[in-house]
Image: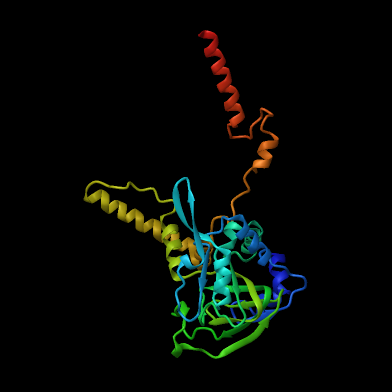
Amino acid sequence: MESPTLAAWVGDVESFTGRRWQREPALFTPEALAPPFDLDELDAAFDSGLLRTPYLEMVRSDKVTIPSEAFTASRVVNGTAHHGFADRAKVLALLRRGSTLLLRCVDQWHRPTGELVARLSEELDRRIEAFFFVTPAGGQGLAVHRDDADVFVLQAAGRKTWYVHDAPATADWRLGELPDDERSPLRLRGVLEPGGVLYVPRGFAHRAVGAGGLSAHLSLTVRDLSVQDLRTALERGLADGLGLPARPLGEAAITDAGAALLDHARARLDALGPAGLLHAARVRPPVTPAPAESLAEAARTWESGAPAAGRTGLATVSRTWRKLRGSAAARG
């Protein structure tokens, strides 16, 4: 399958998948690769007034917890106070004191980022999420940690120094921050400039420190399967196509249901195989829903009298209501 989106980030896709993918970290310097989300887009999100928790938080690597009240504000709507709206002045003040701004699931609320994630998700056959980090020079948002995902980083502004350590020694590794006695050898150290890309394989411990300016980067986390994902897919597959009564009555009926269940499971297991199980576990809903009719499009056809298929237009309802009122007035 062609992978133009991945190629724009890492260059030769065949070389990347054969040498790097899930094997070793790497730095890339693509030509003219611009992130869909940058500091200008972040300012636009602040200006919209709709950015709020849980999509943003402030973090520090020294385990100091930053309460949401320190970077958000409350608003009164229809007499009720609502909390968690992003406050740019507070965010900037915390950035100047060394904290990092973390934006979560940018693909859910920024359309160009969502489109990028959808394309790459289709190419890699993986679930992907987008995060955005803003860090001052010398700041470090997260301590050395392992992610349950392959990570692609695209530098958007400033410079950031990355430290990537070795892979976990065993398959039963832990997520999150590493204890001091689990620090593994350093595999890669590099500084990302704007437009630069870093790839970190799943489970490889890493950290990042702002190296110059107000550093900002977009992270795409590529989720892969866990044993729990395989269990869930197996349970779903074993029950697929099974038509048994929910509550068989009597010992004989229960025994027959159990025998039918075992026969069905054996047949499904024989047909499934490891490759089929992995495919079933990776089946996922569309990353972004099909685009709905825009309000501008609706407005252009609002008075045409021909509402979209499968939808009763409000204009049609309004005309019907006027006719009914006219008939009632004539009868009165």
Q: Which residue is drawn at 68% across and 69% down?
A: 6
Q: Which image quadrant for residue 268?
A: bottom left
Q: Which image quadrant for residue 90?
A: bottom right
Q: Which residue is drawn at 49% across and 64% down?
A: 277
Q: In which quarter of the image is the N terminus?
A: bottom right
Specify how the rendered protein is coloured.
rainbow
Q: How many labels does the image show?
A: 0
Return the x and y of residue 58 as percentages of the image width and height: 52, 71
Q: Which residue lies furthest to the top in this view?
A: 331
Return the x and y of residue 321 as percentages of the image width and height: 55, 22
Q: In this view, does 18 lie above or below 245?
A: below
Between 176 and 174, the residue placed more toward the observer is 176
Return the x and y of residue 295 as percentages of the image width and height: 64, 41
Between 326 and 225, the residue placed more toward the observer is 326
Q: Which image quadrant for residue 65?
A: bottom left
Residue 130 visible in the snapshot: no
